[in-house]
Structure formats: structure tokens, C-alpha cells
Image (cartoon, rainbow, N blue to C red):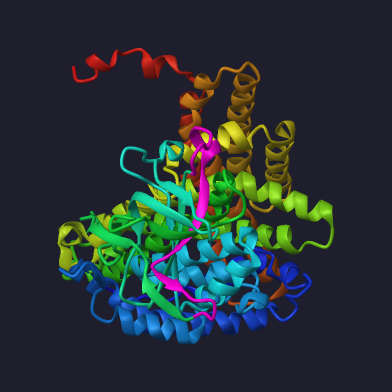
Amino acid sequence: MSDFTPPLKDMNFALEHIGDLGAVSRLDGFEFADPETVEGILSEAGRFFSEVVAPLNQVGDQQGSVLKPDGSVQTPDGFKEAYAKFVEAGWGGAHIPEKWGGGGLPYTVGIAIQEMFKTSNMAFSLCPMLTQAAIESLIAHGTDEQRGMFLEKLVSGVWTGTMCLTEPGAGSDVGALTTKAIRQEDGTYRITGQKIFLTWGDQDLTDNIIHLVLARTPGSPPGTRGISMFVVPKVLVGSDGSLGERNDVTVVSLEHKLGIHASPTCVLAFGDDGEGAVGYLIGDENAGMKYMFTMMNTARIGVGIEGLAVGERSFQQALGYSLERKQGRALGSDPKQSSPIIDHPDIRRMLMTMKAYNEAMRSLLYTVASQIDFERHGADDATRVAAAEKVALLTPVTKAWNTDMGVELTSIGLQVHGGMGYVEETGSAQHFRDARIAPIYEGTNGIQAIDLVLRKLPMRDGQVVEGHLEAIGRTVQDLEEFPGIRKALAKSLDRLTEATQWLGMKLGESSYNEALAGATPYLRIFGQVTGGWLMARQALAAKALLDEGEGNAEWLKAKIATARFYCEQLMPQTDGLVAAVTAGEEPLFEIDPAMLSG
């Protein structure tokens, strides 16, 4: 497996010209996070993740985490030591407010740090990602006592956190959960039930794990309206912060998975050995679904990073292999020597496809991240509300489109290797296997498409999505010097607009099945065209720097060439999806289920 080299030039360019880091650094409290300072921070983070974490990626895949006879989980060789260094360096809490013990960096910079962490070792990175989701939820909804008891340790990484949502038989239907929570005289609750698919549900990296558990109290309403959220520590914590007795939380088993073998995916039982596990109610009873989305939205952005991360790691390995591997003779080359496979047009097409999609995904992530900073720290209500609307619109796209692309790019990366890509020793297959979970995580991509169509398109009577389309249109007008990009973006924008209007009409008629039948191809079009818009903006930024005589001219020309390739060759593929969006439900239900097998 190839080494990981942080793509710092690409990251800094996207942060400054797409993520609007300059404007973010002018927000109150972020004045220290100017582009030059951030460049230094990212350089140091890149060194850490490439040297300390990346070398464990293949080790973790080969060894995996295992459940020992005593019920504890053992992580692969080197993970415990690397995690201790991660905690010591403070990378886990880099973008958490200083008030809670974090580094106080903008969320935009935190996303860039997370990108490098996930690219270096996706399985390892999942543990701190879920910890950050727990931190966000406690900050937003926890009591002062709960924050005082848990936050400092979670932010520092001394303890980790999990999201305990899914149950056997419930799956994505969270409202079907049956875990019970019974209030005690001392105000605590006793939790009984079983949760499945718990990423990093147990480990040997830390002395404690803080589980955030969804459960039902007696007499609660059915469905999602009757769900509450509880803090359930693996080890009980005293009023002075000291660790006490082990809580009644046990690991039933670990799942045997296609990929991310180093990440222990647990089945946990609460209350199997007694009256129930001790839990503490977060906020109000029956408000757990609302609180869950605080965790879920943080995690959805985190999973969106994973699509880029495995795509980038796979690209770097494929590029390195294509430069070294010699096979056949490229047209015009020395007939006495084999050519590096990168000289063959098909290999070059695959590499350009990977590079272009990675840059588009990165731009989308940094766009959403900067809007989260404006949502939280904008100078006025109008700024904050507008940013929140953009975040809401783009979050399902960021999660679903990025992770779909991650699977496609890791498959392409394997193809570049030819037969060697199918051999585990090269490491290319691991990226493909690891990537496949991301479209399933945190609400499957089909659920993200439903969210986009049913919840996000109608926001403010459709004006939010209309504003997004208008922003793309304004960029089209700025592309006079790039006629190819301009023509492609204008045409694809027309197709996206057509699909959006058709869905809006069906929603207005309450023809929800008609709309949902086209939700997934619509999300694909939305992501593809939004990616083209952001790549066009990269081309404009690179051209401006060239005109000013700044930067590396060859590198900036490569930026423009990549944007052209994306907009003129990749983005038009979505034109054929409009028919799938507007076909309605009949083609999907015309065949009786009994006839599907032929």
C-alpha cells in the first residue's frame, strides 16, 4: 500500500477560494485563523496523520479488532499508542470552542483536519468522529452538570463517545425501537435493551466510553414522538469526576464486516446483568429525536468526508502505481520499451476522473463547513439564517453524493491496478471495501434523497433551492473566458432546474410517491451540477491568480484543466438522469414483486 501524502496545496486552495477562509477568519473569535496561520496548522496535522496514523491502515485491516473471552475488545497493534499520541496532540478537539476545552478553530479548519485523519485511516478516524457528535449533542442539549462531568474528557479524547440508535428489527426506522428507560427515585434512569451496529461501541484505547442512547420511558407516545435520549457511561463517574463501578453495559458480539475491520462494530446489551444500566436523561423526555439530529447532522458531514477520504487515498495509490507500472507501448513511444501505464489514454481518463471528483467533493465539503461557521458566528440574524438554510439544503447532498462517489472512485482505483488491484497485498482492494459502508452510514443514501426532496426542496416555499440555482447561474455569467465550461454548466443547470421544478409540482399536488420515485437520481444530478459549479469557481480563481502573476503557473493551469475535464466530460452525464427523475412511480411498481425473479 502506498504512503499517504496530505494534498495540502489543493486543500489550502479550496479553503481560501471556495471555503472563503478569509471571511471566516474575520468572524468574531476567529481572527487568529487567517490563511497563513491555518496553512501552518494543516501542515503539522498532515505530518502527524501521515507519519503516525496512516501506517496503521493496512495493519488494522489485516488484524481487525477482536472480542476477547473476557468480553473486552482488543484493537490492532499500534492503535492504542497512536491514539495516545492523537490525544496528546489535541487534534480531536481542534475546532471545539475553547469554553469546552477545545482549540477554538473554525469548523471549516476542523473539517480539513478531519479530511486528513480519515484519508490516513478511515477505520481509526471513526472513533473520534462519533465522539465529536456526542460533544455537539451535549453542548446543545445537556445540563450544566452533564457538561461538567463529561465534556472535558470527551473534548480532550481521554474518553470517547458513541451513538446508540439502531436496534434489531428496527434498522433505519428509529421510531420502532424498544429499549426501555425507567426513572429512579434519585432522578437517574435504568436502561434495558439491545443496540446493534455500534461503531467503536467498545475498545481498549480509553478508560471510559460515553454512550448516547435512545430509549422509551413508560407511557411515551408511539413512534419517534416517544423517544428520549440518555447518557450511559461504560464506567460510572463520581461527582468528583473519578471513575467508579462498571455500568451494566456488555458487548454481545462484534460484526464480521466487508471492510473497516479495525473499527469494532458492536452489539451492546444494556441491563442484562441486573436492574438496568444507569443513564442520565438529556433535556426533556420524548425530545430524543430532536437531539438525535444534532448528532446525526454532525455525523452526516463526517461521513461525507469519508467519501472524499477513501477517494483521495485510492487516487494517490493508483497514481503512484500508474507511474511505476510499465505495460504495452503508448502511441508514439519508443518501440523497444514498455510504457508507464499512465501514458495510455484509458488510464489517464481514470486518473483524471478520480482527481476531478476529489476536488469537487472537497470544494463541497468546505462550502458546507464555512456556512456552518457563518450559521454559528455570523454578525447578524440574516447572515446566520441564510447560512443555516444553505447547510440544511446541502447536508444530504454532501453525505450521499460524496459517499456514492467514494465507492465509484475506489472501484476505479482498483481498475487502474488491473489484476493486481484485486490482490489484497496491494492495498487497493481495502479502499474499495472500506468505502462501501459510507453510503449506508447515518441514514442510507436513499434516506438522504428523501430528505432532500421532501424536506429541503420545500424550505421557504422553494426559495432556498431557487437561491442555490441562481448562485450557479451567476457563476455561468462569469465564465466568458471559459466557453466550454460555461456551455456545459449552463446546460446542466437547465437540466437541474427542470428536474427541480417537476419535483416541486409533484410535491404541490401531494403526489409524494411520484416525487420519491425520482429522489435518488435527482440527488445525483444535484450533486454533480453543484460540483461543476464549484469546479468552475476553482477555474475562475486559478485564472485570476495567473493574471496577477501569483502562484505556481503550471499548478494553476492544472487546476483549470481539471475543472474543464469535470465540467465538459463528467458533469454532462447527468443529462440522461432527468428522465429517471420525471418518470414517476409507475415504472417502479408496474411489475408485481412476485414477478421480479422472472
- As drawn, the residue found furthest toward the front would be 185
Q: In the picture provided, is 415 more to the left or to the right than 377?
A: left
Q: Residue at x 60, y 77 (%)?
A: 102
Q: Is residue 367 visible?
A: yes
Looking at the picture, tell me which residue is in the foreground, 378 or 169. 169
Q: Is residue 164 magenta?
A: no
- Image point 40% across, 45% down: which residue? 179
x and y percentages locating residue 349 in the rendered image: 37, 54
Quadrant in the rendering for residue 462: top right
Question: x, y (%) of residue 382?
Answer: 83, 51
Measuring from the top left, give residue 103's x and y in whole percent: 61, 79
In the rendered image of this protein, does residue 320 appear above or below residue 330? Answer: below
Judging depth in this view, the residue of 65 and 311 nearest the camera is 65
Q: Quadrant of the C terminus?
A: top left
Q: Position of residue 145 (x, y in %)?
A: 61, 69
Q: Would you place residue 73 above or below residue 385 in this image?
A: below
Image quarter (top left, top right, bottom left or bottom right) of the N terminus: bottom left
Start and end of the magenta stretch? 217-241
